Amino acid sequence: MAKGTKADIKSMEQKFSDTAFRLTQERNDFLLPQVLDFVRQKRWLNLRPEYQRRQVWDDVKRSLFVESLLLNVPIPPVFLYEYDLSRYEVMDGQQRLTSILEFYENRFALKKLDRWHELNGFRYGELPESLRRGLDRRRISATVLLVEGSGEHEQNRGDIRKLVFERLNTGGQHLNPQELRNCLYEGLFNTLLITLSKDPLFTDIWEIPSYSKNVDKHGNISPALRDNSLYKRMGDCQLVLRFFAFRKKANLRGSVRSMLDRCMEENMGITEGVAGQMQEEFRSRLQLASNIFGKQVFRYKDEDDKWQLSQTLYDGIMVALDRLWKQKDRLVANKARVVHDVERLLQDEKAFEVIVGRPNTARAVQQRMDMLVEAIKG
């Protein structure tokens, strides 16, 4: 590949001068009790499951991490972003810090350890005093990122934070697209997605353990909910987002991921009134779908004649009902016919491929909506 001309090189050098971030990195080591104090005093923020991502580590992985601390095995540093004087946001390391906090608070017992199997079944408060003292002397490293400068750089701090966070959390077992959106597009709309994902009807349809029975008054989450595949990686929130992203015809362009990202970005600044209206619209469309299709809502029969949930069928039905909302009373009155016509549509091989086969293009998404609108209103 040919090298650039002198003009190209000069342009590259100018871009480097203009765009390189003025970041300072500081490295510090902290004893575990200091880390606990910082978290409890809210100097290190955003450790709870609904920030960044939900608790991905199970008790086995958390136990291995605690064992590594006891064995004095080196562990990766956490990354903090100083957004205000001596106030830090955790950009990378949530799982490690949460594991430390919850072990010290006796929220889980060590399990399935092979190297130090004698520790299995022990909580922090049950460990021999010498081991607790040893754990208190262990350290965790923190890399603190500070943005230098003022003026234009001050205005771009938010963009810098987002880019650094995304680069830290891509690759390996890191954040998936919805977990990244949850971090990068904070605000009322993101909170709305989380709220709607807890709706009892929504969790019942998607076979997610109910929050009322699986989250106690202290915010502790049962293993049944924590390990649910949709809850664990914020797939439930992405399902809610898909409705808002696909209902707007002008947004049906580009890849599905770009549609979802664009929807998050466009709704970052919504007011409480708009958020309340969007909440009512989602819940009313979900209730209408349930009233019409009953227990088999968003489900189709597979080759073995078993009912299977389908995210893409959910997309189509929710948006179709949204577009036909003014006819809701007629649809409910004729729900048997509606169910019959949708089932007949899914028996067509080509239609099934578009609606349930999950083609991931804007054209397929639009076709899916149009097919279900025609079938339902027919």
Image (cartoon, rainbow, N blue to C red):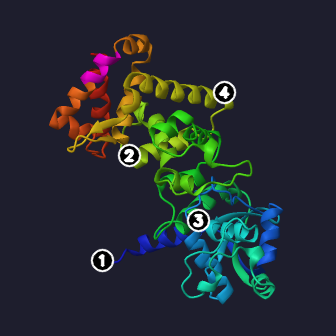
Q: Earlier in the sequence, mark 3 or mark 2?
A: 3
Q: Amino acid at mark 3?
A: Val
Q: Earlier in the sequence, mark 3 or mark 1?
A: 1
Is 338 one of the magenta-colored residues? yes
Which residue does the image show at 49% across and 66% down from the upper left?
Answer: 170
Coordinates of residue 13 in the picture (x, y in percent) = 52, 73
Q: Which stretch did the figure color magenta?
A: 335-341
Q: Which residue is mark 3?
A: 164
Which residue does the image show at 52% across and 55% down from the upper left?
Answer: 232
- Camera-side residue of 50 and 43: 50
C-alpha span from label 4 to label 3 = 33 Å
The answer to the question of whether label 3 and label 2 lie on touching residues, with beta carbons closer than 8 A, is no
C-alpha span from label 1 to label 2 = 36 Å
Mark 3 or 1: in front is 3
Q: Quadrant of the N terminus?
A: bottom left
Q: Which residue is mark 4?
A: 273
Instruction: Examine the rendering and report whether any part of residue 36 can be seen.
Output: yes
Name the secondary structure under disc 4. helix
Q: What is the crowding at mark 2: few (fewer than 14 residues within 10 Å), some, or many (at least 20)?
A: some
Q: Considering the whole magenta stretch, tell me its main secondary structure.
A: helix
Residue 109, by quadrant, is: bottom right
Name the secondary structure under disc 3. helix
Q: Earlier in the sequence, mark 1 or mark 4?
A: 1
C-alpha span from label 3 to label 1 = 31 Å
Coordinates of residue 34 in the picture (x, y in percent) = 81, 75
Q: Earlier in the sequence, mark 1 or mark 2?
A: 1
